[in-house]
Image (cartoon, helix red, strand yellow):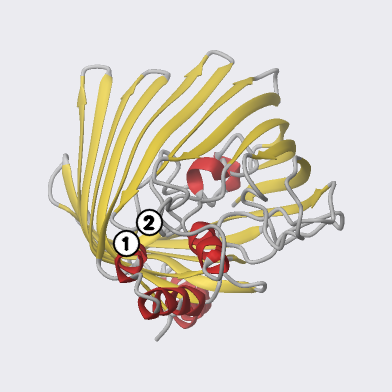
Amino acid sequence: MNKSTCSSLLLLSLAGVALHASAADGPTVTVSGFGTAALTMADTDQAEFARPNQVSGAGKTARTGVDSNFGLQATAKINEWLSFTGQGLVRKNATDAYGAELAWAFAKFKVNDDFSVRVGRIGAPVYMVSDFRNVGYANTMIRPPAEVYRQITDDSFDGIDVIYQHSYGDTTLTAQLGAGSAEARIAGNYTAKFKPLTALHVVVENGPLTLRFGRADATVAVEGNAPLEGLLGTLRKVGLGSVADKMAITDVKGSFTSVGMGLDWNNLLVQAEYAKRKTGTLVLMDTTSWYTMLGYRYGKFTPYYYYGKVTQDSPRTIPSLPTSGPFAPLTAGVNYAIQTPLQSTNAIGVRWDFSKSAALKVQMDRVTPTEGAGAFVNAKPGFTGPANVYAAGIDFVF
């Protein structure tokens, strides 16, 4: 049974679960939801702005699919030590159509006041905004900065984790260690597999300050990428097998390390992350990415600004390959395959909490590709930006 089918069954069963909760001897069940209704557009028709892992986006014609989503979550608490949680999510991801997916489906065992264990499909703790990255209402900005959040696009893994949480005076420590595997459909109609996968997530909170460290390691394989497989086959045929070996994505080691901080002090908001991705293949490029967000509350209004940037640490060209003659097109194909989209973003926006469970956000991004089209998709030849991106949306929870 695939993710979409599982998710559909989960969503259909939520109503029945909620009805069962009304029975006197039944488990305690809570059902909640979240969503974003947004319009997004850019000031260019030469390329499309999209979220990470979307195959199409928005140009001069405003579109709803870039930043809109809808989710439902149900938790059944059986007793003091056992509960079950499921979350279904509808959004555009890896395809040009809305699709349903089973984001979470886990059993949680409370060992004692400090330790708990979860088994099933669990949110992947790779970012500061991990468990609630798709819950727009929980975030100041209309979307997580793509410069960092496009480096790992898988939201969950199947396996087990152990969570430790304890307060030491005014400081709360939360540590999460998980292990399992993940499989994600990637834009371009191919599949990335992470097996085995381990993840460590440590958060320290003291009053208005939050500090975070995260580390994920996995063995990565990509299947079904026909253009890459054709390129590697050609390299081997012409005697460049050593280059092909450096570009293959078959059981290669990869890691993602990040640190973050958040400050919510009086009316001042600060959020920042710094991350490094490293792999054993030139096609999954080594990157350094970061962003910083500043905001200030004026009653129900929160204007904010952020700057984000991504750079590539691994080579963007292979100097030993010929740049002229009959092999020049092959060299161009190789260099294109080993170059990650580079860009920076300056963004300004405002959040208006007009309701206790809904907020209106308006945001403008000035996206500047460093080379080529950056992270814009479906770019026409010659597009190099920069471009302005405009979005307005209502985030809600219930």
| Residue 99 in the image, given as x and y percentages of width and height | 59, 74
Q: Mark 2 is on which residue type?
A: Leu
Q: Which residue is mark 1?
A: 246
Q: Residue at x 51, y 62 (%)?
A: 331
Separation of marks 1 and 2 at Cα, in angstroms: 6 Å
Q: Mark 1 is on which residue type?
A: Lys
Q: Residue at x 42, y 19 (%)?
A: 208
Q: Is residue 16 visible?
A: no
Q: Earlier in the sequence, mark 1 or mark 2?
A: 1
Q: Is residue 78 left or right of residue 42?
A: left
Q: Are marks 1 and 2 in contact (CB under 8 Å)?
A: yes
Q: Secondary structure at mark 1?
A: helix
| Residue 305 in the image, given as x and y percentages of width and height | 65, 25
Give the quadrant of residue 221.
Answer: bottom left
| Residue 308 in the image, given as x and y percentages of width and height | 57, 33
Q: What crowding class fits label 1: few (fewer than 14 Cα within 10 Å), some (14-19), or many (20 or more)?
A: few
| Residue 322 in the image, given as x and y percentages of width and height | 48, 59
Front residue (pair 180, 193): 193
Q: Residue at x 59, y 15 (%)?
A: 267
Q: Which mark is residue 282?
A: 2
Q: Residue at x 55, y 64 (%)?
A: 328
- Quadrant occupied by the N terminus: bottom left
Q: Is residue 336 visible?
A: yes
Q: What crowding class fits label 2: few (fewer than 14 Cα within 10 Å), some (14-19), or many (20 or more)?
A: many
